[in-house]
Image: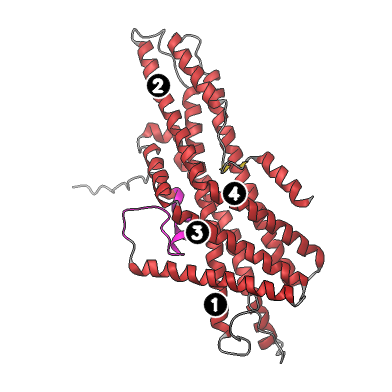
Amino acid sequence: MDNVAEVPEEKYVEVDDFLKLAVKFYNTLGIDPYETGQKQTIWFQIYFVLNVINMVFSFFAEVAALIHMLREDENFLECCIVLSYVSFVVIGLSKIFAVMKQKPKMTALVNQLKTCFPSPSAKDQEEYAPKSWLKRCHMYTKGFGVLYTILYFAHALIPLFVYFVQRTLLQYPDAEQIMPFYQLEPWEFRNSWLFYPTYFHQSLAGYTATCGSIAGDLMIFAVVLQVIMHYERLAKVLREFKIEALNEPNGVNKDLKKLQSLVASHIDILRLTDVMNEVFGVPLLLNFIVSALLVCLVGFQLTLDFNPEYFCKQVLLLTSVLFEVYLLCSFSQMLIDASENVGHAAYDMDWLGSDKRFKKILIYISMRAQKPVCLKATIVLDLSLSTMSIVSTRYYS
């Protein structure tokens, strides 16, 4: 009997493949952003509680350190730096609590994404091209994740690295033990064994804030790209629609049935967009409010004084915040363009030989597409590239 090599089954893309990186970041904090059917262990929950307690404690300690520095009229540059860290912790905490509060809605959103996701059939795989969209998703999410990871390690490790260089290599007798984010704790940590536990506690709080911020944005990117994929597929199918009314006896009914399924698909995508904005509206608003404060603070710090250690870290923070705002506005612009493209596709298709009922349905599709969808920071702000230009102008004015 001939040995026939087994052909490995082709792995099809799933919704979880898009969300995998965001979920991993959430899991490192002890968070499941949506229900997966797996019960959380008690250790997983304890780990989350300890993370939050440590972060909240660090937040109040930072605020106390800031108040102390202002009262003592200490270095104004350091006051601005601590205030920027306080702002970053606020957005991290806010995003963590937002995802916990929105967990049922996030679960509903993910389930809806799975319902709409293309099946493994060859036809759906060709129309949607999910592998291509997954590659784009990984390009954005991994790049963004790497940038914020570098940001975190730069802030967490540079002070420790400077201390070891001064103490070990240069052998300075008065090498100063500096914390990564703020220098005031309820206990004395300098020249004591408490230095390293205190350093770890502040670094862990910074990691929690960073992951809370990263994970929320990665989830937004992954969901928006899937919604854009559905809009692009709908526009493609409309443009390639072949009218059968003049070629087959029952062609009119076939055309109507096929078009009605596309209309239903369009309505499902619009509903999906509404749920998406409901889930991500508050985190987006927090992003823009705190980002505005961070950009102003960091920009002001860079004009006050030049310190190589502070300068590199603050430039990296400024770059990360601006890149985050740009990506959110860029994704929203892609969503606007994709939703408008459905209306253009309805007009471009070969509809001249179609039935009157068919043409009326096309009008409804075009009317729905005339109001493009976008990412909404609640009712306060609609995101687009024009929003980015307006916000940037106000940042630097």
**Three-letter code, disc 4:** Leu
Residue interval drawn in magenta: 18-39
Asked if 52 appears above or below 255 in the picture, the reply is: below
- Residue count near mark 4 (Cα–Cα under 10 Å), binned few <14, some 14–19, many ≥20: some
**CB of mark 3 within 8 Å of CB of mark 2?**
no
Closer to the chain start, of discs 2 and 1, is: 1
In this figure, which residue is indicated by the disc labeled 4?
Answer: 285
Q: Which residue is mark 3?
A: 96
Q: Quarter of the image holding residue 58?
A: bottom right
Mark-to-mark CA distance, 4 and 3: 14 Å
Numbered badge on residue 200? 1
Query: Which residue is painted at 60% across and 46% down in the image?
Result: 328
Residue type, mark 2 in image: Gln
Q: In the rendering, which numbered label is found on residue 333?
A: none
Query: Residue 260 — which label?
Result: 2
The reply to whether dot 1 and dot 4 touch (C-beta < 8 Å) is no
Residue projecting furthest to the bottom: 173
User: Viewer-nearest of labels 3 and 2?
Assistant: 3
Can you give x and y, in whole percent of width and height, for residue 260 in the image? 40, 21
Q: Nearer the viewer, mark 2 or mark 4?
A: 4
Q: Which is nearer the N-term, disc 3 or disc 2?
A: 3
Tell whether position 205 is magenta. no
Callout 3: few (<14), some (14-19), or many (20+) C-alpha neighbours within 10 Å?
many
Crowding near pointer 1: few (<14 within 10 Å), some, many (20+)? Answer: some
CA distance separating discs 2 and 4: 37 Å
User: Residue 283, can we see it?
Assistant: yes
